Amino acid sequence: MSPIVILIIVMLALISNTSGYTTKLFKNLIRRPNLITKIATSSPSFSTRLYATTDSKPEQKNKKEKLNLFDIDIMSYELPSNENDPELLKSRHSTAHIMAMALQKIRPDIQCTIGPWIDTGFYYDFHVPNEPLTDKDLKLIKKEMDKIIKKDLPFIKEEVSREEAKKRIQEINEPYKLELLDSIKTEPITIYHVGDEWWDLCAGPHVESTGALDKNAIELQSLAGAYWRGDENNQMLTRIYGTSWKDNTQLKVYKKRVEEAKRRDHRTLGKKLDLFSIQEDAGGGLVFWHAKGTQIRRIIEDFWKDAHIEDDYELLTTPHMADLGLWKTSGHHDFYNDDMFKPMEVEGGEYQLKPMNCPFHCLVYKDTPKSYRDLPIRWAEMGTVYRYERSGTLHGLMRVRGFTQDDAHIFCLPSQLQDEIVGVLDLTEKILNKFGFNKFDVMLSTRPDGSVGGDDIWDKATTALIGALNAKGWPYNVDEGGGAFYGPKIDIKIKDAIGRSWQCSTIQCDFNLPERFNLEYTDSDSSKQRPIMLHRAIFGSLERFFGILIENTAGDFPLWISPVHLRLLPVSDSALDYCYEIKKAASKFGLRFEVDTDGQRLAKQIRNAEQDKIPLVGVIGEKEISDRSLTIRSRKKGDLGTYELNNIVDMINQAVVDNVELHEMNGIAIPVVDASTASE
Ligand SMILES: [Zn+2]
Ligand SMILES: [Zn+2]
């Protein structure tokens, strides 16, 4: 194996979250949240624009940038990625070296460890023995980096023996590098010099010389703590994150997107809009859904349940824990232990909080004998599960310790498999579309080494998955050998409004659990056969999907899902009675109206409603009371005019049912008063 391959493997091992249970069942959904750092590989549609000014900021004198800086649609601008641009990867990797070099020029006491490239740039971990680094230092380091870039020093490769490498590392007193050297198993060892000023143990690749980098495309972002080799028993190191691109335009686009992602951060919006909280008194990773959040959750759940019932699913409800023996039967005790909470003692036995719902559905299946005529069986459950996540990895709603899976299991005959998968894809599309997600990235993962089940069943299942994707006409990528050990699977990522991808839906064939639970059906020839089991989730986790939904909409939920459809704004207290009458009339349709009772002036009431992101407000003054009308203002479109009360309540109801905004309704009721004279 070449040194570069080894180095990549070492780096991957260090930065990846290695998992115990090889099944990875549903785990990808929860364990790999796409954080802000993922937004680099984006494409779609958002119309925030970055306009270039003609004033001569120093960086705009650069010719290359001038071409790009006019009127860029930052959300559709295609930023390059490490995967599709090897030059970018080289430059990021080289930048990490230069940062380490610059830091050691300023602080010779600091020792280097590793510095890999990441999705949007690079980081480097340092051992800082004395004075800790601050944000001020980042500025000094960047200045020093700029000098190194300006000097245009060449990257020079040197091959040395292990002994020689060891000797040189000892000379410069870099104990972490010595450990890294031990993990490199082949010779010769490669060293890269930056001019004759600095060197690092590395397999490359690098740019030709430091001058190939654009100082205006690089920014040092933040400091963080990180354990040596990711192990919390090891020394705590200081990590410096940097972002680097090919030119200043790309850096600007990236930063604008990060800013946009920050503006949409579900943790901030969740607090501002009073949707949910994580209570430190209750412990990390446990979500409290507040009244408005629960309102949205109820709407999501109701829609989801109705859609499943329409599709001939049945709903189950199962416990939150079970005897440890069950988890031994299912294999979770042996293969998923790291992700489970410790069992609790119950009357001398042990109970386990459930990390998954599947074994429970297997028990229900086994509870009565099944015939081939009973299949397919489709059982869905909003099943709340608990998984142990380290406190350092918890992140808002995206990574939590207790969450509700929108789970379902299908038990079917081999001959029914493809139709069932098509059915799941149809339902997935229907449900995701309803929430405004229309762009999917589909991945098919095939048989890995060490899998269970014969060739025959693997071929059949893989063929069924492919057949279903073809029947849907969905393009997909193949992850050869990326399936679970118990069966092949399809994973679906959704694209959000700022171009980020989120892994949500999954469909997995399982040849293992039916075996472990000895699930059977009686076939037409009276023989006992094993059903095929499909696991599937559409949102993945309700909590995480809510987080994605908040960020996708920036808290401006579509009308049908808004916790409040319309807020009534009384111009004076004398309008309150009419407001309550309207609220009552609306609630007969299940519409969610509320009354502003703060007694503020109208302008202030409108501003408050804006801040609370209420989609519609209804203004009630003397004229509205005497005409029995309502003057409507939409958050997105401004004044919509004045309408006869019953008509407008009907129209709002229809908009909610049709999943459109009020201003998108055809034949909206004729205003009884001309809009231009509508009361303020
Ligand atoms: Zn290197
Ligand atoms: Zn399952």
Image (spheres, grey):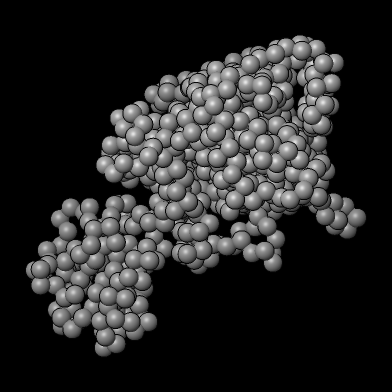
Asked whether the viewer can see residue 664, the reply is: yes
Looking at the image, residue 88 sits to the left or right of residue 473; the answer is: right
Query: On the rendered image, what quadrant is the N terminus found in?
Result: top right
The residue sitting at 50% across, 23% down in the picture is: 212
Single out the residue that lies furthest toward the right.
Answer: 348
Q: Quadrant of residue 168?
A: top right
The residue sitting at 10% across, 72% down in the picture is: 677
Residue 236 in the image: above or below residue 597:
above
Looking at the image, residue 403 sits to the left or right of residue 227; the answer is: left
Residue 463: percent from the left, percent from the top?
53, 17
Q: Quadrant of residue 632?
A: bottom left
Residue 576: percent from the left, percent from the top?
30, 84
Residue 377: percent from the left, percent from the top?
56, 37
In the depicted view, which residue is nearer to us: 640 or 187? 187
In the depicted view, which residue is nearer to us: 13 or 241? 241
In the depicted view, which residue is nearer to us: 189 or 273? 189
The residue sitting at 40% across, 51% down in the picture is: 553
In the depicted view, which residue is nearer to us: 127 or 528? 127
Looking at the image, residue 294 sits to the left or right of residue 409; the answer is: left
Looking at the image, residue 611 sits to the left or right of residue 405; the answer is: left
Residue 182: percent from the left, percent from the top?
82, 23
Single out the residue that lies furthest toward the bottom.
Answer: 574
Query: On the rendered image, what quadrant is the C terminus found in?
Result: bottom left
